[in-house]
Amino acid sequence: MNQLPGSVDAVVIGAGLAGLAAARKINSHGKSVVVLEAQDGVGGRVRTDKVDGFLLDRGFQVLLTAYPELKTQVDMAALDLKMFSSGAVVMRRGRASVVSDPFREPRWAIATVFAPIGSLTDKLRIAVLRWRVMHSAETKILSKQDVSTSVALRGFGFSSKMIDRFFRPLFGGIQLDPDLRTSRRMFEIIFKWLSEGQSAIPTNGMSALPEQMAVHLGADKIFLNTRVTKIEPHLVTTADGTKISTRAVVVATEQPDAGLLIGIKTAPSRVAGCVYFAADTPPTDKKFVVLDGTGRGPVLNAAVLTNVAPSYAPPGQHLIVAALPGIVDGDLEAMSRDQLRTWWGPQVDAWRHLKTYRILHAGPEQLPPFQPEQSVSLGDGLFVCGDHRDTGSIQGALYSGRRCGDAVVAWLA
């Protein structure tokens, strides 16, 4: 096991995506850097557990291939991404209706026209909105007058039926916000990424992303099971009393921990529940995300992950994930079974429960007026990064980490 150095140019606290991105940028400029991580692995919230041969991401997570930072920070081919179909299946009263992106899934175009999720005008408005966001720069979207996603959708002219049966379960799930209170700026950015790319999962689980970044940084620079208890100007102290002298400190922990460590003001956290089931037979053979079309939940969306990536389960087995944004209390397994039974019938009772996740910090709340690109420099060699400084997403974490690394390099120059 490597021994912590007594002095380095920069200490990064937290081996999530933002911390790894910052450390890689600092290291690439020839500066000495170590990453201190309290957990037993890298990735922060982007972790994958192995349970009985199944790959369980800590929460229903996907990688949007249109994230700009992936092009410069990640070897996408090495992740061996498996793609979801473009669109969704909406479940209502036991009936499944396919709503696809007709530009990428033309064989479902007629089914989409007749799907009972809204009027034909609603569906035409989706096409118009898609064109608008795809032809708008991200900087322009993020500078628009801001309101909540719900208010913005009504302003676009969408009916209550369309909002409740499509936008709420889809974007409420992505943004972990069933009430659609999140900034319309964030909504339009996500819509743009969904329209320009695909939703995917790596063959070996979402943890493949941070693990690849860690390998590129170098294992000798990452210290796991190493909790930081105190930060002073140019000095970091760990739980075992080790002190590291440094010219720069980067706090890249989860937002609540960052608030405690350095006393910065933090936004409330989004919470989320997630339940995994194993089945001998999949309830559907489609690669679409499945949406709750009732507007009631508590499961807003679900997926048969093995339809997308068979590697997520042992041979002959299938993995179903149910996402419950905003819910962490109560018997999440029973809640999920009750709802999924209305979708797929009594076969749900035979499914084996694998694990339930109650994620108390699934992401930062980003209400209007939402301002990304918050300062990463707090002065006197202290820096902070994470998706709470930019957009609440994998893209936001990677981008925040990279620009924080640039700021540290400039400080050390």
Image (cartoon, rainbow, N blue to C red):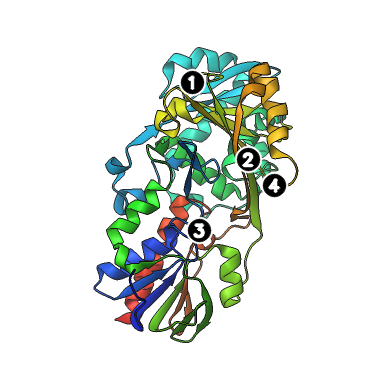
Q: Residue at x 50, y 26 (%)?
A: 288
Residue 135: x and y, percent?
A: 42, 40
Mark positioned earlier in the residue sequence (1 or 2):
2
Camera-side residue of 250 and 72: 250
The residue tagged with tag 1: helix, strand or loop? loop
In this figure, which residue is indicated by the disc labeled 1? 286
Q: CA distance from mark 3 to mark 2?
A: 18 Å
Pointer 2 and pointer 4: residues touching (CB < 8 Å)? no
Residue 245: x and y, percent?
A: 39, 85
The three-letter code of the residue at mark 1 reads Lys
Residue 355 seen anywhere in this rendered image of the structure: yes
How busy is the neighbourhood of tag 2: few (under 14 within 10 Å), some, or many (20 plus)? Answer: many
In this figure, which residue is indicated by the disc labeled 2? 172
Q: Kindly report which numbered mark, 4 or 1, lies closer to the viewer in this rendering.
A: 4
Q: Is residue 114 left or right of residue 233?
A: right
Q: Residue at x 60, y 29 (%)?
A: 352
Query: From the viewer's perspective, is residue 329 above or below residue 341?
Result: below
The residue tagged with tag 4: helix, strand or loop? loop
Q: Kindly report which numbered mark, 2 or 4, lies closer to the viewer in this rendering.
A: 4
Camera-side residue of 194 and 385: 385
Image quadrant in which you'd find residue 167: top right
Residue 374: x and y, percent?
A: 51, 66
Mark positioned earlier in the residue sequence (3 or 2):
2
Residue 297: x and y, percent?
A: 71, 33
Mark positioned earlier in the residue sequence (2 or 4):
2
Mark positioned earlier in the residue sequence (4 or 1):
1
Q: Quadrant of the N terminus?
A: bottom left
Residue 376 seen anywhere in this rendered image of the structure: no
In this figure, which residue is indicated by the disc labeled 3? 387
In this figure, which residue is indicated by the disc labeled 4? 328
Query: From the viewer's perspective, is residue 17 above or below residue 26?
Result: above
Q: CA distance from mark 4 to mark 3?
A: 22 Å
